[in-house]
Amino acid sequence: MMLSSKCEISNEFKNRIGPKDSFAHKFVKTADEQNLWHECRGVWEEDKLCGAYIQTIEGKLANFKLLHVFADSRGKGYGEELLRMSHVEGRLYADYWKCTSELDAIRFYEKLGFKHHGLVDYCDAYLILGKFTENLMELDYNLDRYIKSLIKTKYRLRRGNDATRRT
């Protein structure tokens, strides 16, 4: 397995999209519209791109924006490796990690130990938000002032969601 570092992989990513890679089109659209390809990191098996993520650093927050593992590379640990890479990088520059997971992907994050605060009010996505801890791939979900502020102002949860009750 070969890992990338701060390289532009937009053409390689676009060329790898197959018929079972439906989310990849959203990944490309978002990366193009928000000019995020310079923040894209990938993982390769020999010369084949297996998956990629985009994460931005916004003050104290590592914002994990996108993750895609290509259909023919799923089930081999690449998604977990990409998350691990995002945490290593995020911890260098930020105190908190945030991800909004689409409904069909939340089980992937839960399987790796992540917990969500509930559904975000303005989209069909679960909010995963926590403070980095000493342990890699582990977050502190306690509702400190910063997390409460983000939930109240930026990532409002749908009514009926209780940010203190997590699944």
Image (cartoon, rainbow, N blue to C red):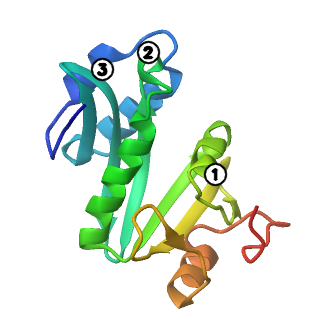
Q: For the residue labelled by badge 2, is the local secondary structure a helix, a strand or a loop?
A: helix
**x then y, percent, for residue 119:** 71, 57
Q: Residue at x 61, y 83 (%)?
A: 143
63 left or right, relative to 15: right
Q: Quarter of the image for the C terminus: give it.
A: bottom right
Q: Nearer the viewer, residue 19 or 79?
A: 79
**Label tally:** 3
For mark 1, does the 10 Å Cα neighbourhood hold few (<14), some (14 to 19), or many (20 or more) residues?
few
The label on residue 110 is: 1
Tell whether 16 sits left or right of 110: left
Residue 161 x %, y %: 80, 66
Horizontal arrangement in the rendering, residue 53 relative to residue 25 (left or right) = left
The residue positioned 64% from the left and 61% from the top of the image is: 115
Tag 2 residue: 72
Q: Nearer the viewer, mark 1 or mark 3?
A: 1
Quadrant of residue 29 in the image? top left
Q: Which residue is mark 3?
A: 14
Q: Earlier in the sequence, mark 1 or mark 2?
A: 2
Label 2 environment density (alpha carbons within 10 Å; few <14, some 14–19, many ≥20): few
Say which amino acid is labelled 1. Glu
Question: Tag 3: residue type?
Answer: Lys
Q: Position of residue 116 (x, y in %)?
A: 65, 61
The CA distance from mark 3 to mark 2 is 15 Å
Amino acid at dot 2: Asp
The alpha-carbon separation of the residues under discs 1 and 3 comes to 28 Å
Quarter-of-image position of residue 58? bottom left
In this view, the residue farthest toward the bottom is 145
Badge 3: residue crowd in 10 Å (few <14, some 14–19, many ≥20): few
Q: Residue at x 63, y 78 (%)?
A: 152
